[in-house]
């Protein structure tokens, strides 16, 4: 008889910090104490708090452990599971702002209390490899309801009324997209799930597929019914092996139960899904390039129109929705469009999942209602910048997006607000930058990514981004002039206006956004030859303050290029700038703070 | 699976197996399982509670806890309601445990005969 469930995160983040070994250790300890029949260990998807992984949750006690090592697992079994004494030192805690006391109750921990989970509802709660657990959470009820009580047009109307917009980046109304495809003449049509998540730092789609693969399959079948398609593809990158494996298991289980296949719920509707692996090219997230890739061709975009809803994969009407969009469809059908439309802002309904990364205390996945402010997400849920550093900006929308600053923190996040502020929602990546980040360097990082990922079909993107990268590198390395700045901005606009697909059209955004918001940093690099954040090495100088130097020689001994000379105990040490490689080893070594960086 | 009813049946079965992961229950039943509790016979009590709950689907969770501090009264079973009101039952055995569930958890009637006065 089961009396306790031990849930261990088996998402990519926790797996890489040894959660699989934690599971094994817990299981072997349970066997030693002969508890294996009454305590069940379940591998789940992501809990969202990746910073504190591996995560272990124990129910019904509602105890939440973080940073669990295989050694800790022994203690958890012996103390908590056997004797009923939770291991306090491993428990996730918060400090109560008023009483300054520790909060152990998981429902009061700020990271979770502020969130509202729709797309991530089952992640970290169910075993993604067991269809029964998904069904226990009302899984496949939405599909059953649609097939047995609704017409395809009623399904589309319900999605339209909910106000759901595409979560992959553009925010196009999902119901309208479905309507276009449904309006095409009857015949072969396709449903594609875009799981080619490419933005650096974004991992919400991966987590949904790893933690709750069935919700995507169920929603794809609903979409198929709505537009009259009986075949679906999940286009996912091969570098997500855990997600691919769980999708395959989920597909097999759904087929075995007859929830995919022929004559689902005796309604006469057939639907099946195939997985197509992508090689991990950023441009294949663009829908026309994705279609080419599914057809076995080189992943390159083509001009639109015709839109995929008219002529998509194999020339047939096709709808392409992102993983997170699909994760919202089944809940909408189950709970109704009014429920969904009651969450969020006027034009952006529901919730959005964000992947918090960069200089933030709680790296991880969070899902909040649209309209939540950046301040709430970054400070209250994310815990702010670590080490008491000052917040500088947050980059949203990945390589296609832009930066938001302190002044924008109290803006509610939704599709339109972010665009108005010069950034975009994108897939939901949020990279927090603090005072130690150089904004020119950040722009260069994204441009470097784009140059790698540009498919090369159109010249503005192929050549323009390469030239922009060269200019940014010049600025970072101290060769920039007023002309470089002028040309950079001019070229950025040109590439934006003339590129073929979304990748090129948005490639300039990080440059334009940082130029607009952090012009002073560009100027410092170009005119003063200084990097205010001390990131660009070529613009740094190290020197030793003679009055502070104790002549101990520690700096000279740590210098890898022998650039520091002096006489132990007698003469003050001096750095030779010609030999110095600006590695900062002397600064770290000096115990008296005598090394100065400028 | 041929009909929506088949799915509902499967769902109701599956629900019973994951219900302990949801925090929203009317009562929390705690069993003292420290050395004193185990020595006094708390394990059969715990087993009886878990089995009865699984069979009857009472609106409660059964959890073990450490030493409650009244070792002479072990085995101790505490029943907490949603307002945090706590009733402490003492010298519980497997038979009494089932009675406590039946009376207190199912019908909301305190079993004064077994509780700490």
Image (cartoon, coloured by chain):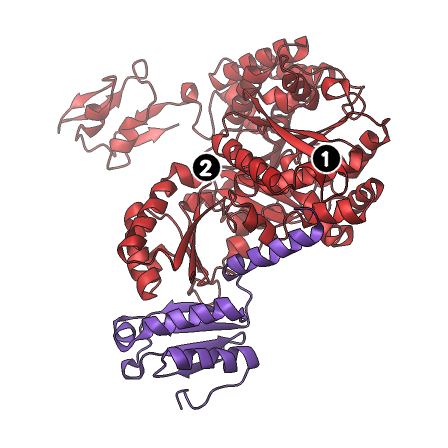
Give the foreground label among 2 and 1: 1
Q: Position of residue A16 (x, y in %)?
A: 39, 36
Q: Residue at x 35, y 48 (%)?
A: A68
* Picture layout, residue A485 above or below residue A187: above
For label 1, the SS is: strand
Alpha-carbon neighbours of circle 1 within 10 Å: few (<14), some, or many (≥20)? Answer: many
Say which residue label 2 marks: A12
- Comparing A162 with A503, the one in front is A162
Q: Is residue A457 left or right of residue A318?
A: left
Q: Is residue B36 left or right of residue B108?
A: left
Instruction: Assign the N terminus of chain A to one quadrant of the image.
Output: bottom left
Q: Residue at x 28, y 17 (%)?
A: A576
Say which residue label 1 marks: A270
- Comparing A283 with A39, the one in front is A39
Decide which of tag 2 and tag 1 comes sooner along the chain.
Answer: 2
Is residue A332 something that shows in the picture? no
Is residue B36 something that shows in the picture? yes
Q: CA distance from mark 2 to mark 1?
A: 33 Å
Q: Which shade of the palette goes to chain B?
A: purple
Q: Which shade of the palette goes to chain A?
A: red
Residue A156: numbered disc: none
For label 2, the SS is: helix
Q: Are marks 2 and 1 in contact (CB under 8 Å)?
A: no
Please tell me in which quadrant of the rendered image residue A406 appears: top right
Q: Residue at x 66, y 41 (%)?
A: A218
């Amino acid at each position: 008889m089961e009396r306790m469930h031990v849930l261990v995160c088996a998402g990519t983040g926790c797996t890489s910090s040894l959660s699989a070994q934690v599971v094994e250790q817990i299981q072997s300890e349970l066997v030693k104490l002969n508890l294996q029949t009454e305590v069940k260990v379940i591998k789940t998807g992501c809990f969202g708090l990746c910073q504190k992984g591996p995560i272990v949750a124990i129910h019904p006690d509602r105890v939440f452990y973080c940073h669990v090592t295989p050694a800790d697992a022994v203690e958890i079994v012996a103390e908590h599971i056997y004797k009923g004494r939770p291991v306090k030192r491993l428990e996730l805690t918060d400090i109560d702002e008023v009483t300054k006391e520790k909060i152990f109750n998981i429902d009061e921990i700020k990271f979770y209390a502020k969130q509202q989970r729709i797309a991530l509802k089952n992640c970290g709660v169910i075993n993604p490899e067991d269809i029964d657990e998904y069904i226990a959470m009302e899984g496949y009820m939405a599909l059953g309801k649609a097939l047995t009580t609704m017409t395809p047009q009623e399904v589309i109307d319900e999605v339209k009324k909910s106000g759901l917009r595409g979560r992959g980046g553009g925010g196009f109304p999902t119901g309208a997209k479905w309507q276009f495809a449904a309006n095409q003449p009857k015949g072969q049509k396709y449903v594609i799930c875009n799981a080619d998540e490419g933005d650096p730092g974004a991992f919400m789609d991966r987590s949904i597929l790893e933690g709750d693969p069935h919700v995507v399959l169920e929603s794809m079948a609903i979409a198929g019914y709505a537009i009259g398609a009986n075949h679906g593809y999940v286009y996912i990158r091969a570098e997500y092996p855990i997600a691919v494996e769980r999708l395959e298991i989920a597909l097999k289980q759904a087929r075995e139960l007859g929830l995919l296949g022929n004559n689902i719920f005796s309604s006469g509707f057939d639907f099946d899904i195939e997985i197509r692996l992508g090689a991990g090219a950023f441009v294949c997230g663009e829908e026309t390039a994705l279609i080419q890739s599914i057809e076995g061709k080189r992943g390159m975009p083509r001009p639109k129109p015709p839109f995929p809803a008219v002529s998509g994969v194999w020339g047939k009407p096709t709808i392409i929705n992102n993983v997170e969009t699909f994760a919202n469809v089944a809940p909408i059908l189950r709970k109704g469009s009014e429920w969904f439309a009651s969450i969020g802002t006027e034009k952006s309904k529901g919730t959005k999942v964000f992947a918090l990364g960069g200089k933030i205390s709680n790296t991880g996945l969070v899902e909040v209602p649209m309209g939540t402010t950046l301040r709430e997400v970054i400070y209250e849920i994310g815990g702010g910048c670590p080490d008491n550093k000052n917040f500088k900006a947050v980059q949203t929308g990945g390589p296609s997006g832009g930066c938001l600053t302190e002044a924008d923190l109290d803006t509610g996040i939704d599709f339109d607000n972010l665009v108005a502020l010069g950034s975009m929602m994108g897939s939901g990546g949020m990279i927090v930058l603090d005072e130690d980040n150089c904004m020119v360097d950040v722009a260069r990082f994204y441009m470097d990514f784009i140059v790698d990922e540009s498919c090369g079909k159109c010249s503005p993107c192929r050549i323009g981004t390469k030239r922009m990268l060269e200019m940014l590198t010049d600025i970072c390395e101290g060769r920039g002039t007023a002309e470089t700045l002028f040309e950079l901005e001019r070229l950025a606009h040109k590439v934006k206006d003339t590129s073929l697909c979304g990748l090129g059209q948005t490639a300039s955004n990080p440059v334009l956004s940082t130029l607009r918001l952090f012009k002073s940093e560009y100027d410092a690099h170009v005119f003063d030859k200084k990097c205010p954040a001390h990131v660009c090495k070529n613009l740094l100088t190290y020197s030793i303050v003679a009055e502070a130097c104790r002549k101990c020689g520690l700096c000279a001994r740590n210098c890898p290029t022998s650039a520091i000379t002096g006489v132990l105990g007698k003469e003050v040490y001096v750095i030779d700038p010609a030999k110095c490689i600006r590695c900062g080893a002397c600064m770290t070594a000096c115990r008296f703070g005598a090394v100065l960086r400028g | 699976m041929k009909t929506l009813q088949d799915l509902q049946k499967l769902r109701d079965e599956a629900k019973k197996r994951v219900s302990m992961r949801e925090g929203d229950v009317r009562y929390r039943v705690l069993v003292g399982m420290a050395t004193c509790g185990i020595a006094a016979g708390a394990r059969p009590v715990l087993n009886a509670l878990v089995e009865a709950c699984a069979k009857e689907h009472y609106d409660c969770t059964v959890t073990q806890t450490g030493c409650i501090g009244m070792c002479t009264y072990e085995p101790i079973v505490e029943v907490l309601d949603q307002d945090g009101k706590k009733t402490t039952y003492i010298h519980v055995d497997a038979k009494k445990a089932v009675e406590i569930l039946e009376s207190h958890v199912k019908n909301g009637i305190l079993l004064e005969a077994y509780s700490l006065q």
